[in-house]
Every structure is written in C-alpha cells, then in structure tokens.
Amino acid sequence: MSSSLLHSPLAATLGIVHPLLSAPMAGVAGGRLATAVSRAGGLGFIGGGYCDPEWIGAELAAAGDVPVGIGFIGWRLAARPTVLDLALAHGVRAVLLSFGEAAPFAPAIRAAGARLVVQVQSVAQARAARDAGADVVVAQGSEAGGHAGQRATLPLVPAVVDAVAPLPVVAAGGIADGRGLAAALMLGAAGGMLGSRFYACAESLAAPALRAVAVAASGDDSVRSPAFDRLRGWDWPPGYALRTLANAVTREYAADPAAFERDIDSARIDYARAVATADTERAAVIVGEAADLVGDCPPAADLVVRIVAEAAACLAGAAALLRRDA
Ligand SMILES: Cc1cc2nc3c(=O)[nH]c(=O)nc-3n(C[C@H](O)[C@H](O)[C@H](O)COP(=O)(O)O)c2cc1C
C-alpha cells in the first residue's frame, strides 16, 4: 500500500499513508491496536497514559518492529520521565504529549529522531506547542472521549490551523466516521485522530462488556464528571474534565458530591471490583459524543479502510453541493 485516496502533508511528516491516527487511549490502546492501525496505513498510538513502565514495556514489546507512536499524559510524565527513555529506546515513530508541558521533553524526542505530536485544547496551547518545536499539533475538542478542555472541535480546529500555519494540525474530538474525517479536512486539518471509534474495535483492551455498552450508547448518554478521577485517585490539574458514558457512579456524584466524597474509601474498593468484573453500571465506559457513530467492533484495519473510503466519497460528493446555475 503506497498511496491514499486522501492527500495530506501528514503522510510525509509522519511517514504514513492515510491521514488517520488512533488515539493514545490510556490502558485501552495497546501494542495490538496500534500496530493494526499502522499496518493499515495510519499511525497507531499506544496509550502510555499514566506512565506505568511495566505496562508500557509489555505493549512496546507487543508492537515489535512495526512503527507506532506512544502518548503520555504530560503532568504525569513530568513525575515519571524515565518512561520516555523506554519509548525512545524502543524507536517509536512519534511521541504524543497532552495535558502538560511539552517543551522539557522536546530535545530528547528530537535527538532520538522521533516526531513530537502535541495535543492541545486551546489556541494559546497550540502556539506554545509550536514554540516548543511540535512537528504536529492535535486540536482536541471537548466532544472527545476521555479528558479534554472546554472548546468544541468545529471552531477550535480552524482557529488552531490559522494560529500555527504551516504546521500540520490534526483534528480530534467527535470524529468517528468518514463524514467527520472529511469535515476535519475541510476545516483545514491535515488529518483526524480517533479514540472512541477505536475503543470499540477488536484489538481494544477495553473489556468486551464495556465495548458492548459503547456500541449500544448514544452521545446523549455522555457526561463530563470528576467522579471516576476521584475513584481512581488521579489528581488532575484544573481545566480538564473526563467524558464518559453516564452510569450509576456519575449519577451518584451528580446527586450529592459531598456524600460521594464522604464515602470515597469504600467507593474506591467498589470501583476496583467493578473494573475487575467489567460491571457496566459502575466501571467507566470512556467514550465521547461520537458514541452514536460507534455501531460495531470490527478489526481496526477495517475501520481505517472504511473511514478513509467514506471520507474520500464525501469529499468527491461535496462538489455536488455547488450550484452551477448561479
Ligand atoms: C478511552 C480513552 C482514553 C483516552 N486516554 C487518553 C490519554 O491517556 N492521553 C491522551 O492524550 N488522550 C487520551 N484520550 C483522548 C484522545 O487522545 C482523543 O483526544 C479523543 O479520543 C478524541 O475524541 P473521540 O473520542 O471523540 O474520538 C482518551 C480517549 C479515550 C476514548
């Protein structure tokens, strides 16, 4: 496979065929998912998330010599910087940093010959990413599954494109099919990065019961809540919120946050049990507003091919929207 139906500067920057990335979903995107996307012509990111060296080492080993990227949660990487060395020693193609400072890590990433991809939630963060030496900026809207900022994808992407031109910008948040990818390209993005759609694919590390809930859900069911971060004990900096599907846990938090905090110790034990047993009413199902567009759990490679073909068809069909008699 040497060419894509979609032309994008991202292909040359990241050494890929299709302008489609799978997101570094913490604990959900392992080596199998990332390599499946990369083999299909996109770039798959391992979800290095909270920087557990054992998990990261195992998933990098599972990726073998297939080119993949890896993503880290920036504020956590600042506390555990040695996992970056692990990834760079493996020879990852790209490192994606979100939710923290990129500048301290840029020299090591550049020296290792990897690309620096920075996911941002605002125009100001996009400029800071450019100044830190990012090769690619991902503009993430708050529709996204997982943590995100305050701004929506549709106005954020073109604003970031204008702010950091000519750097390639990738759109993320709410894209789950070819229509979304085509729309992102029309906004000036060089590609799309998808998380929720790949949460429900065959190679995802999310438990099958949780994936089934994601497939059945609507974006109407998605909420942003501190509840799961409180239960997991992650102390996120202000300005970010976790989007998941609503369930008993988010409803209990919304009904009485003070009571939720009072019972936090026993709730943490219940939560660990819920995760271990894939209890869909109490474990987090981390998908975003694109849930309506997540209707099956196919192999990741099929998704890449399907989404690129749909996007190309959308773009080809767009000319039909132009009036010829005006
Ligand atoms: C299950 C899940 C876990 C995520 N974990 C991370 C993470 O650890 N680091 C990160 O930068 N982004 C993470 N994200 C956000 C993605 O990078 C991306 O911005 C988002 O998935 C795009 O929106 P979408 O879910 O609508 O496709 C996660 C998303 C999901 C769905």
Image (cartoon, rainbow, N blue to C red):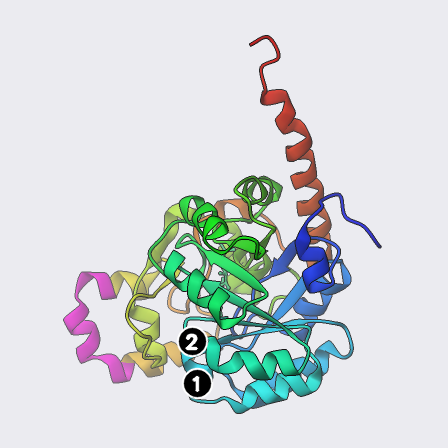
Q: Image quarter for residue 108? A: bottom right
Q: Position of residue 19 (x, y in %)?
A: 67, 53
Main secondary structure along the magenta-highlighted residues: helix
Question: Which is in the foreground here, disc 2 or disc 1?
Answer: 2
Tell me the quarter of the image containing the N terminus: bottom right
| Side of 72 relative to 260 (left or right) | right
Which stretch is magenta?
Answer: 253-266
How many C-alpha atoms fall within 10 Å of the one at disc 1: few (<14), some, or many (≥20)?
A: some
Q: Position of residue 315 (x, y in %)?
A: 65, 34
Q: Position of residue 13 (x, y in %)?
A: 68, 61
Q: Nearer the viewer, residue 31 or 165?
A: 165
Determine contact: label 2, label 1, CB under 8 Å. Answer: yes
Q: Work out which residue is located at the far right of the displayed protein and give it.
A: 1
Residue 259 lies in the magenta-colored region = yes
Residue 251 lies in the magenta-colored region = no
* Residue at x 44% of width, y 69% of height: 279
* Residue at x 51% of width, y 73% of height: 26
| Side of 270 relative to 144 (left or right) | left
Q: Image quarter for residue 60? A: bottom right
Q: Position of residue 55 (x, y in %)?
A: 58, 85
Q: Which residue is mark 2?
A: 101
Q: CA distance from mark 2 to mark 1?
A: 8 Å
Q: Which residue is mark 1?
A: 78
Give the vertical position of 175 relative to 323 (above or below): below
Q: Nearer the viewer, residue 191 or 56?
A: 191
Q: Is mark 1 within 8 Å of ligand 1?
A: no
Residue 166 in view here = yes
Q: Which mark is residue 238?
A: none
Give the vertical position of 267 relative to 306 (above or below): below
Tell me the quarter of the image containing the C terminus: top right
Q: Looking at the image, how many numbered discs can be counted on the residues?
A: 2
